[in-house]
């Protein structure tokens, strides 16, 4: 508008590696005193190693000494804004790796990939990204894919804060979930680093409670007590939540759905009531956590209800349960509910069929199904909902007492 001045906040890129007028690489992380830095600035002119444009060399009292472009649009290689937290974090990690006698490169530009990881370990073919700010999911996935296509292992470390509530649960945004990794030791896990504390914090044995709420074992280790590749000690207990806690959280989930949305507007609740059933009285075998459920953006109570309501309850004892029909059922449920199958770029992706198979194996251990010699799952017994809350509590208590030890530890 006329007469109105608009101020735009500049977003500078902080750089730790430049070149001088002789073309020599200058790595500021290698200089330990400000006197050395002042002398360095006095005797040299500095240029961007990528675009060759002149760089400013800033030695202040509040921020880490760094280079920066004179203009924000000078160089696409350093176009992403970097905070002081990010600058300190990658400097900490660089020195940590260098102290382990590793050939680590700081802000190395990889021309074949046209990418610049924060840290690069050429001998191990590892690219380390320390990410504090939120970036688009497609950019995260693209960078990861490019590394993988060139046989480099991308190791992403989250540099922000993870919220946890008073119940020991953690809230992970869709962006934070991109950092999820998987191992045979820690199941789903997530690495974070805090420059203020100079410590790694790991969320281990992550179990989804909802699409953004997770249970996990939290482990914080000072940077100087870790080596790379990461040597995370095994925990005495791998269970981050008990089966009893899960059942309580499942009830809380139902309660919130009933409170925050009218049942006519909630597709799941509407379908439960239309089938003349009560969500609180559903058999406790409906809504159990299984491996792979993290990929489906529906609560296990939802998708397992549809399997029972549309497949299992229409079969007689001794009849075969078709995995393919259950997969087709879930695809239809996803389409109606407008949800997609999640993919995490740093973890192997499970298929819908694998998720169904995990639930079938759980029901086999619960003696609801049995697996015959022909490789087919057969209905062994039917399950019935409770008549009232007292009966529902008894069914739930019985299941927890009988099955928690072997079902929970094996399946989660």
Image: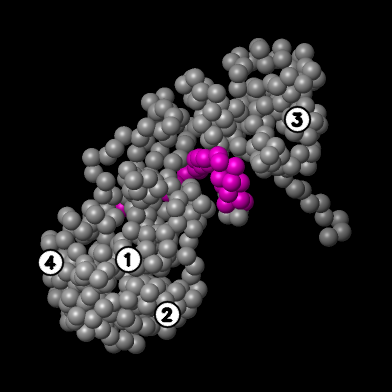
**Which label sits in the foreground, 2 or 1?**
1
- What's the magenta region? 139-167
Circle 4 residues within 10 Å: few <14, some 14–19, many ≥20: few
Figure check: 179 above or below 234: below
Figure check: 120 above or below 41: below
The numbered disc on residue 132 is: none
User: In the image as oriented, which residue stretches furthest toward the front?
Assistant: 374
The image position of residue 146, as x and y in percent, is 61, 46
**Residue for badge 2:** 267
**Residue for badge 1:** 357
The image position of residue 271, as x and y in percent, is 37, 83
**Residue for badge 4:** 398
Q: Nearer the viewer, residue 160 or 50?
A: 50
From this viewpoint, is residue 164 visible?
A: no
Residue at point 53% right, 35% down? 126
Q: Nearer the viewer, residue 369 or 220?
A: 369
Q: Residue 160: within the magenta?
A: yes
**Whole-number angstrom distance, CA of label 1 to CA of label 4:** 25 Å
Look at the numbered discs 2 and 4 and tell me whether their residues touch, using CB distance below 8 Å: no
SS assignment at label 4: helix
SS assignment at label 1: helix
The numbered disc on residue 48 is: 3
Please report whichever mark, 2 or 4, sits nearer to the chain's N-terminal start: 2
- Indicate left or right for 349 with 412 as reference: right
Please report whichever mark, 3 or 4, sits nearer to the chain's N-terminal start: 3
């Amino acid at each position: 508008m006329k007469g109105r001045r608009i101020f735009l906040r500049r977003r500078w890129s902080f750089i730790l590696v430049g070149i001088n007028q002789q073309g020599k690489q200058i790595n500021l992380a290698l200089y330990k005193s400000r006197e050395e830095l002042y002398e360095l600035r006095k005797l040299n002119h500095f240029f961007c190693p990528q675009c060759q444009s002149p760089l400013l060399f800033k030695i202040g009292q509040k921020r880490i000494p760094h280079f920066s472009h004179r203009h924000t649009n000078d160089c696409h290689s350093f176009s992403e804004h970097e905070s002081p937290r990010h600058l300190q974090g990658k400097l900490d990690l660089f020195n940590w790796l260098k102290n382990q006698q590793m050939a680590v490169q700081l802000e190395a530009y990889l021309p074949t990939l046209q990418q610049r990881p924060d840290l690069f370990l050429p001998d191990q073919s590892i690219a380390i990204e320390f990410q504090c700010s939120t970036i688009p999911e497609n950019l995260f996935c693209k960078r990861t894919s490019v590394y993988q296509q060139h046989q480099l292992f991308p190791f992403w470390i989250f540099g922000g804060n993870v919220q946890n509530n008073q119940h020991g649960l953690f809230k992970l945004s869709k962006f934070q979930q991109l950092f999820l990794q998987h191992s045979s030791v820690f199941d789903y896990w997530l690495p974070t680093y805090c420059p203020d504390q100079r410590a790694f914090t790991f969320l281990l044995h992550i179990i989804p409670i909802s699409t953004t709420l997770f249970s996990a074992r939290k482990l914080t280790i000072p940077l100087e007590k870790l080596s790379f590749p990461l040597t995370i000690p095994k925990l005495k207990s791998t269970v981050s939540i008990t089966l009893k806690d899960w059942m309580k959280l499942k009830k809380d989930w139902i309660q919130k759905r009933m409170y925050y949305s009218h049942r006519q507007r909630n597709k799941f609740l509407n379908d439960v009531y239309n089938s003349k059933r009560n969500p609180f009285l559903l058999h406790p075998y409906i809504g159990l956590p299984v491996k792979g459920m993290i990929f489906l953006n529906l609560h296990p109570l939802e998708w397992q209800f549809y399997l029972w309501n549309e497949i299992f309850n229409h079969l007689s004892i001794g009849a075969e349960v078709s995995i393919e029909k259950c997969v087709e059922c879930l695809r239809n449920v996803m389409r109606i509910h407008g949800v997609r199958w999640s993919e995490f770029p740093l973890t192997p992706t499970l298929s819908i069929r694998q998720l169904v198979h995990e639930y079938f194996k759980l029901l086999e251990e619960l003696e609801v199904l049995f697996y015959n010699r022909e490789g087919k799952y057969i209905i062994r017994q039917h399950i019935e909902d409770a008549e009232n809350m007292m009966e529902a509590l008894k069914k739930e208590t019985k299941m927890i007492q009988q099955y928690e030890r072997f079902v929970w530890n094996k399946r989660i």
